[in-house]
Image: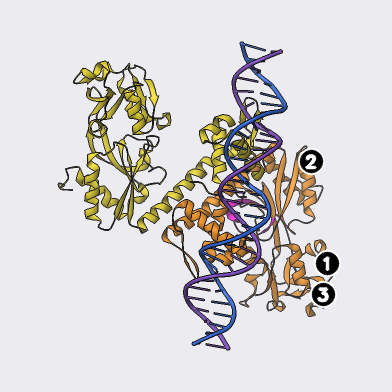
Chain colours: A orange, B yellow, C blue, D purple
Amino acid sequence: MDVDTRLLRSFVAVAEDGSLTRAAERLFVSQPALTRQIKQLEDRVGVRLFTRSQTGMVLTAPGRVLAARVPDLLAEWDRALGETKGAAGRAARVLRVGFLASAANEATQHIVAEFARRRPGWRVEMRQASWADPSAGLADGDVDAALLRLPFPGQDAVRVEVLFSEPRWIALPEAHPLAVRERIPFRDLRDEPFVAAPPRTGAWRDYWLAADERDGHPVRVGAVTDQPDEWLSAIANGYGIALAPESAARYYARPGITYRPVTGVSPSRVGVAWPASADADPVVRDFVRSCLNSRQGPQGGPV
Amino acid sequence: MDVDTRLLRSFVAVAEDGSLTRAAERLFVSQPALTRQIKQLEDRVGVRLFTRSQTGMVLTAPGRVLAARVPDLLAEWDRALGETKGAAGRAARVLRVGFLASAANEATQHIVAEFARRRPGWRVEMRQASWADPSAGLADGDVDAALLRLPFPGQDAVRVEVLFSEPRWIALPEAHPLAVRERIPFRDLRDEPFVAAPPRTGAWRDYWLAADERDGHPVRVGAVTDQPDEWLSAIANGYGIALAPESAARYYARPGITYRPVTGVSPSRVGVAWPASADADPVVRDFVRSCLNSRQGPQGGPV
DNA sequence: CGACGTCCATGCCATCAGGTTATAGACGCA
DNA sequence: TGCGTCTATAACCTGATGGCATGGACGTCG
């Protein structure tokens, strides 16, 4: 029996949301279209997967069985796809590197230059990931390596080398009362609304909300964004403030936003990560070495 | 990235055959349709999977990576589907039992009756499998249990209880010179053409060709069939002869075909099999018990 | 108690994907 | 050089699918 993985993703979404209407807007399709997708899936499988009611969609017993397996299947498919693309990249001498907005900042160009020196003929394809995926595509096998901020979800499943760390600053609206201070203790910021990453990023989101350094003061979330521009707008518009690496002050300077050093929060660490399955890949190893080398400065010290 | 599993099955078929034309006829689609399916898959994945030539289609390096993973993915999907249908059956109080044509024969009705006694309200759904799948759907999770002939492919991955054994006879055309004999030694049959099961059924096919009891005489295959009616026609039409369980003489009696006892071949064993994952399922256990009980005769002896 | 809001289902229409047949184009082989 | 065997392309047609508008059932709130 054949199915489009699209139907399976729709199925999972509806199962999670318990509602066609909500799932439909999350999937960017109309509710009637989703109704028919689910119906089609049920027809193909030959089993009623949901019981409908005016309060939503509830999985039947067989539906629960399917819902328990489908996410793994989809993840495996995505992984197979990633490996295939990786092989294609290798054939074309392209190394796919994911990075998070603001991850390596000025280090990036040195790393790429160093890699180019080590691997003439190879090209690095930098792929910016949204904050919705702090692993920058590593988890899905979308990239061969990634430059990102630690900690990140799924970190234990991959190899990581720390490259450097830098202080965390605070980004606030120019007109914010605290913006006049030269240096701000974090305890003065704990009760401000924050601009946060999407909830499913878990520990990563918490880290940038400094959840561990609040002494029990609850987080107030003023906005949720997953891209730099949205993030900057949200801050400039006064929805909240946000911690950011020092280098963001240079890379994301913008009228209406002020960056200030913060005391009382741990610094942010930047690392290079790659899947364990690429341990033996000489190109990935060269890239990692390029990263470690660039740590000491553009001309490199002893490795 | 979303794909229809259909495209994946097409991909696997083309990869196996190394030819669009041959794969197309195996899949019962036209060659241009398959050309476009493959092209579509390549577009979606964003990677060239085959190198085309006038001698056929050859996998590229990334294509090999994908081809190595897809069969497992499809198998897992089929398994998830089977489990879902199984759950649906349980909810509807239906036990799905696969059987091979000629597997249990007269025992079947006793087993079903016994099961009905143990599980009032439950219904047994008997599904005849073609000889192309001697596991009768067990391997795909299509059934909750199966009545079949041992040995069968994949036997080690499931639980099996032997129910009984019966002599193997030979089915031959009425006009065959040997049909006049009352009892035929197998060595007199070794050089006859045989009607065989499809090649991919492996050991099962060999068993019914008595490959182990030929003393080196090679098998002559006169026809390949995977359904009882085709099998009977092939024999009646003189394409070959075939070993069959004794009970086939009663269940598949037909003008033009004669069944005779054979000496010098081992008897055939019939068993009930179920997936290890259903070990704890009380309904499956009851079914197995019904089978074992019916072994002694319809009224049952001590279990 | 009735109006309203919130669900999911359905009808209609336009569009597009996918199949089939026929044919072209490339190449190996006799 | 002509034939057979591949895959690619063109033209056409059918059917699937999505969007919009709307219907019907049910809970909720004034």
Q: Residues within 10 Å of mark 1 (few under 14, many from 20)?
A: some
Residue at the disc numbered 3: A174
Instruction: Name the residue carrying label 1.
Output: A254
* Left or right: A298 in relation to B14: right
Asked whether, in this view, residue B253 is left or right of residue B22, the answer is left
Secondary structure, magenta segment, majority class: strand
Tell me the crowding category of disc 2: few under 14, some 14 to 19, or many 20 or more residues within 10 angstroms, Cα based: few
- The picture places residue C10, in percent across and down from the top left corner, at 53, 62
Residue placed under numbered mark 2 in the picture: A117
Residues tagged by mark 1 and mark 3 found on one chain of the structure:
yes
Closer to the camera: disc 2 or disc 1?
Answer: 1
Who comes first in sequence, dot 2 or dot 1?
A: 2
Which disc number belongs to residue B196?
Answer: none
Query: Real-space Cα distance between discs 2 and 1?
Result: 34 Å
Earlier sequence position, callout 3 versus callout 2: 2
Amino acid type of the residue tagged 3 in the rendering: Glu
* Gap between marks 3 and 2 measured at Cα: 43 Å
